[in-house]
Image (spheres, grey):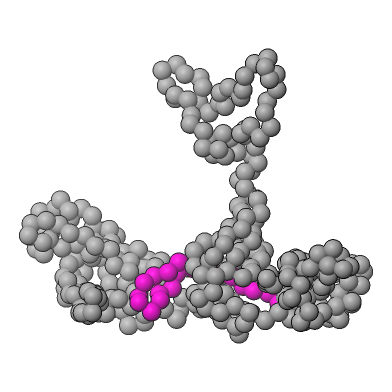
Amino acid sequence: MIGLLGIKLDMTQIFNDQGLAIPITVIKVGECFITQIKKHNIDGYNSVQIGYYDNFNKCKKINNSIKGHLKKANIFDKNIKIFREFKLDSNNIDNLELGEKIPLSLFQIGDKLNVIAYSIGKGFAGYQKRHNFSRGPMSHGSKNHRLPGSIGAGTTPGRVYPGKKMAGHLGNHKTTIKNLEIVLIDIEKNIIGVKGSIPGKSGNLISIYK
Amino acid sequence: MNSQIRNIESAYIKDNIPSIQIGDLIKIGVFIKEGNKERIQYSEGIVISKHNAGINTTITMRRTLQGIGVERIYLIHSPKITSIKILKHFKIRRAKIFYIRNAKKLKEKI
């Protein structure tokens, strides 16, 4: 399904018809243009490439190769630098046009939305934070506080198995959250509000699709 | 806070709420729906704390029912809260008056 790109603004809450408070995440959707349509007979798969244009965070310069790419899609006056692809069925691909702006009216209140974003980076994290290991005793002469313990058997197999849980980088993964309910849409201001939280910090680029 | 977020919230924020202070004796009406019946439940109590957070502003109201202290937190911008009336103000020197849970003098006053 075709989607849109936007920026996570912040979380807040609104009240529904029954007077219940609903936590929402507000997304500022940018102007999204179709910059390339990939077809099965040429590219090997069906998809549509979306270019993201933010009116407030303008990109001043783009290089000539991107300029040429945009020229093919009949976009001349907008500096678009961010592109994302959405895979499509062959049935949906025929009625799309290059350079077309995707409207926010694609979505309606009550629809379920999927969100792709990068989660908050946590840096190099230890065993307890990254894999929920239990820690050693803090007192009684123990020197094992946050150590890994054994990481496997000895001579047989003589190696550490792949995928062994160890310390390392945590967060900043591409994360998808599915079936978030749309509770707020403002087409004039290009704002969409979904129930619940979405990955990443405020100001992060996110893609939404049905 | 982002101005766009504030715009969204402003549609839900009530502007007819009286300025509630700590130590106010208030009467609050809460809309209740039981099956098909709809009614407004009134209750009286003293405001012992206030959490100022825009649309998420809450107050904690304490009252004594049959010798047992009852505290309840109200989301004052919620449409379920139909009315808030300030009956009396007690002279208070603190921002949160949790000490009245154990204070005898103020309890008697109330």
Residue at x 65%, y 37% (from the top left corner): A168
Relative to B62, is B2 above or below? below
Which residue is more in the foreground, A116 or B28? Answer: A116
Can residue B54 be seen? no
- Which range of residues does the magenta coloring cover? A13-31
* Snapshot quadrant of residue B81: bottom left
Which residue is situated farthest in the top direction here?
A155
Report the predominant secondary structure element of the magenta stretch. strand
Report x, y in % for residue A8: 60, 66
Q: Residue at x 91, y 67 (%)?
A: A65
| Above/below status of B83 relative to A8 | below
Residue A25 belongs to magenta span: yes
- Using the rendered view, name the quadrant where residue B84 is placed: bottom left
Tell me the quarter of the picture where residue A139 sits. top left
Residue A1 within the segment the image draws in magenta: no
Q: Could you tell whether A181 is left or right of A33 in the image?
A: left
Horizontal side, residue B43 vs residue A28: left or right? left
Q: Is residue B75 above or below residue A134?
A: below
In the rendered image of this protein, does residue A78 appear above or below residue B56? below
Q: Quadrant of the C terminus of chain B?
A: bottom left
At horizontal 45% and vertical 16% (from top left) the residue drawn is: A141
Could one spot residue B87 in this view of the protein? Answer: yes
